[in-house]
Image (cartoon, rainbow, N blue to C red):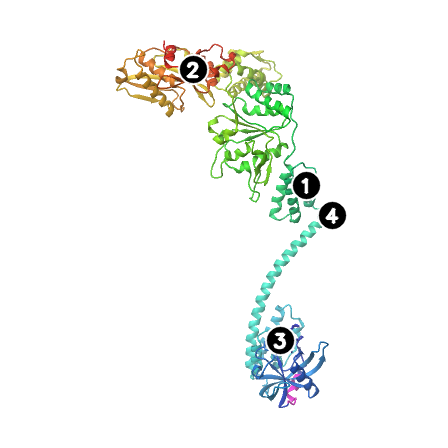
Amino acid sequence: MSFEKYRLGPEDEMDFLPIIPLNESEQEDTNGIEIPTEIALLPLRNTVLFPGVVLPITVGRDKSIKAVTDAYKADKLIGVVAQKDSSVEDPEVKDLEQVGTVAKIVKQIKMPDGGTTIIIQGKNRINIDSIITEDPYFKAKISRLEEEEAPVESDFDAYVANIKDLATEIIQLSPNIPTEASIILKNIENPSFLIHFISSNLNTDIKEKQKLLELNNIRQRADLLMQLLQKELQFAQLKNKVTTKTRTELDKQQKEYFLQQQLKSIKEELGGDTNLQEIKQMQKKAETKKWPAAARELFKKGIEKLERMHPTTPDYSVVYNHLDLMLDLPWEDYTADQYDLKKSRKTLDIDHFGMQKIKERILEYLAVLKLKGDMKSPILCFVGPPGIGKTSLGRSIASAIGRKYVRLSLGGLHDESEIRGHRKTYIGAMPGRILQSLRKVKSSNPVMILDEIDKVGNDFRGDPSSALLEVLDPEQNHTFYDNYLELEYDLSKVLFIATANNIQNIQPALRDRLEVIELSGYAVEEKVEIARQHLLPRQKELHGLKSSNFKMNDKVLERIIQDYTRESGVRELDRQIASVMRFQAKELAFKGKLKATVTVDDIEKILGKPRYSNEIYKTANMPGVAVGLAWTYVGGDILFIETSLSDGKGELKLTGNLGNVMKESATTALTYLQSNANKYPIDRTLFEKKNIHIHVPEGAVPKDGPSAGITMMTAIASALTGKKVKPFLAMTGEITLRGQVLPVGGIKEKVLAAKRAGLREIILCWQNEKDVLEIDSDFIKGINFHYVKVMNQVLELALV
C-alpha cells in the first residue's frame, strides 16, 4: 500500500501526493456524466487512474500541457491512459493501453518553472476505439465502459470484508502509511469504490493495476485484488521482521552507549574517569623517565593508541600492560659500584671461607672499573660440586661491589620464550625472565645469577640455551631483543654469573662465551672453619639456642666431618649439625640447662654409630686389590679395583657397571703386561691358562673414564705376581700401550677424597704436580706424593 507522497523521477506527468477519495455520493453520480465520443488523451507513466480517485499530477511535456490547457478551457474532461512502457519519453499510439479513465480536471496550477500541476478526478472507465489525431496531442474516439452493479450475495460481502482486513493489516505493518488511512477504509461502503481506492494505492506492478482496471466483472476484480493484497501482506510481514531485528540490535547498541555515557558522567562526578587518570599518571611518570629515544617514541605511540581505545576492548589491556612494562623497566637506571677494594675483600672473606681464585677475579674486575670508569661486565661461570656455595657466593659478590642481586633458576627450563618472552599478541603473553628480573630489582646493572645453567633442557618449544647465546655474549647483549617488549635492551652492564655442576652438559657454543672458574671441594680443615664461622652460629639461631653458651670444639666438628659425611660441599655437614642442635634444644626444654661442651662421646650418642670408616683401608689386602681415585660431579671418591684369577683359557671378564673407556683401559693394561711379562716376574703361561676377572665394587653406580688405567694394571700385576699392593696407597692416571703414564683431571677432589679416607701415599703422573701445588699445603699434610712417568715406576712403588 502506498499512501505516502512519492516522486517517480524526472517524469513529465507525474509527481503525486497522497490519493484522496471523494465523497461516495459524488462517486455514484459519475455514471450520470455526459462523456463525449471524442476526447483529448493524457498519457501517464508509472500509474493507473481509477474511477472516483483524485490524483495530483505535474505535467511537463508540451503535448500534454496543450491537451490539459485545451480541455480545461472546454468541458474540463480529459482521457487518462497509462503507457505500456514507462521508460518511453515520447509515446506513440502503440505505446498506449487500450483501456483508460475519463477524468475531470478539478484544478490547474501554473508552476514558476514553466510546468503545470493539475488535480484530476477519475470519472468512468473508457475504451479507446481509435486515435483520430496525434498532433498537437493525442485525440481519440472512445466508448464508455459501464460499471457492474455490486452483487448482493453474502459471499461477496465476505470478499469486501476480507479486502478491508487485509488492507488494514498492511497499513498497521507499514510505518510509513498514516494510521488515518485505516479509518478512511472503514468508512468506505461502496464495494466498487473500495476496490478502486485500494487498487490505486496498491504497491504493485503497473501491469497488475492495468489488469484490475480492464476487468469488467467486479467479482473477478475483487478476487485479483485479494491475491495481490495477500502477496503484499507477506512482503510487509517479512520487511517488518527484518526491521524489528535490526531495530533490536540498534536499540541494544544505543542502550550500551547510553549506559556508558551515564557511567562516564558518574565517574566524572566521583573525581574523573579512572582509566583517564591512569593514562595521565603514566604520561607524568614517562616525563621523568630516563630511557633511550626509541623507547620514548614507542611509548608515545602506545599512549596515543590507548587514549583512542575504549577500556572494554580486548586490546586495551594488551597495550596497557606493554606500556606498564616499559615504565617499570630500569632502562638507564644504575646503582653506584663500591670501589673500596679492601672493604670488598673483607665482605667476601666474611661471607665465604677460601675460594681465593674467585675473590681475586672479582677484585680485578672492580679494580679495572675503578680505573677506567666503564667496562663490559664479564660472563663468569662457577663450576664445581654441589653444596660448596656457588649460588650464595653470587649474593656475596653483589654485596661486596654494592649492586643489587637477582637469581634466575634455569634448572629444567625448556621453553625459549622464558628467556626471550612471548609476542604480546598471544593470550597470557609475558616478557622473558631476564627482563622480569630487571623489572623486579629496578636496576640495569645487578649481579644476576644464572643458576644450574648445565641443566637447561630443550624440546619442540625451542632451545633456551641457544637463546642464552645472545644474553651471554658481551658483543651482542647491549642490543638484547625481547619479543614482548619489541625493543632492544642493554644488558652489557649486568654482571652475569652462571653456576654449573658439570661443564660438559653445557652447549659448546654457550660454553665458549663463559669465563669458567672451577671450584673444587673443601678439605677437612676448610670444613671445620666453615662450620665454626658460619654453620654453627646459623643453626644455633634457627633452633633458638643463640643465647646458650655451649661449645663444640674443632675435634668434635672433625669427627662429624670424617665419620658422618662423605661430600665435597657442606650440606650434609649442615644437616648433621642441625641434628645436634635439635638434640640440644630437646635437652634444654626437658632439663632447663645444657652441658658447657659437646664432646666426641656425645656426638656418637646423638648421631648414632659412625656411617663411614677408614678401617677398610688399614686391613691387609689380598693380592690383586688396588685403590684408585675417581672424580664425580659431587666431588672426589675412593675406588677399589679387585682382580681375581681362575682356571680357563686366558679370557678377560669385566664387571661393576663400567663404561667403554674404562673397559678399554683394562684391555690396554692386560696387553701391556702380556707384551712386557719378561720385565716383571710374570709367568707367560698364566695368560693362556688363567681367566682374569676385574671387578669394581658398588656395581649399581656407573663408572667411566681413563683415570683408573694405572690402578687396573697394578691390580692385574698384583694378582699375576702374587704380590700385595702397599696399604694406604692410592693412585690415578691414564696408561698407554708403551707403558707411559698420562695426566688426568679432578686432582684436587681426588686428593681431598684420599685425605678424607685416611690414605697416606698417592701415585700421580708427573704432569699433575702443578695441580697438587695449587692445593693449600695445610690441607694435604701427611700425604706423600709420588710422581711417575712410566709404568715401571708405578709397579716398583705399589707392589710390596
Residue 721 on the magenta span: no
Quadrant holding the N terminus: bottom right
Pinpoint residue 548: horizontal percent, then vertical percent. Answer: 61, 15
Question: What amino acid type is highlighted by mark number 1?
Answer: Met
Front residue of 375/151: it is 375
Pair 3/2: label in front: 2
Q: Tell me: 468 left or right of 33.
A: left
Pinpoint residue 268: horizontal percent, then vertical percent. Answer: 72, 48
Pointer 3 and pointer 4: residues touching (CB < 8 Å)? no
Q: Earlier in the sequence, mark 3 or mark 1?
A: 3
Q: Provide the major secondary structure of the magenta segment.
A: helix
Pinpoint residue 512: horizontal percent, then vertical percent. Answer: 50, 29
Residue pointed to by mark 3: 201
Please tell me in which quadrant of the rendered image residue 332 appears: top right
Residue 32 on the magenta span: yes
Residue pointed to by mark 2: 764
Residue 778 visible here: yes
Question: What amino acid type is highlighted by mark number 3?
Answer: Asn
Q: Tell me: 416 left or right of 1.
A: left
Question: What amino acid type is highlighted by mark number 2?
Answer: Leu
Q: Earlier in the sequence, mark 4 or mark 1?
A: 4
Q: CA distance from mark 3 to mark 2?
A: 120 Å
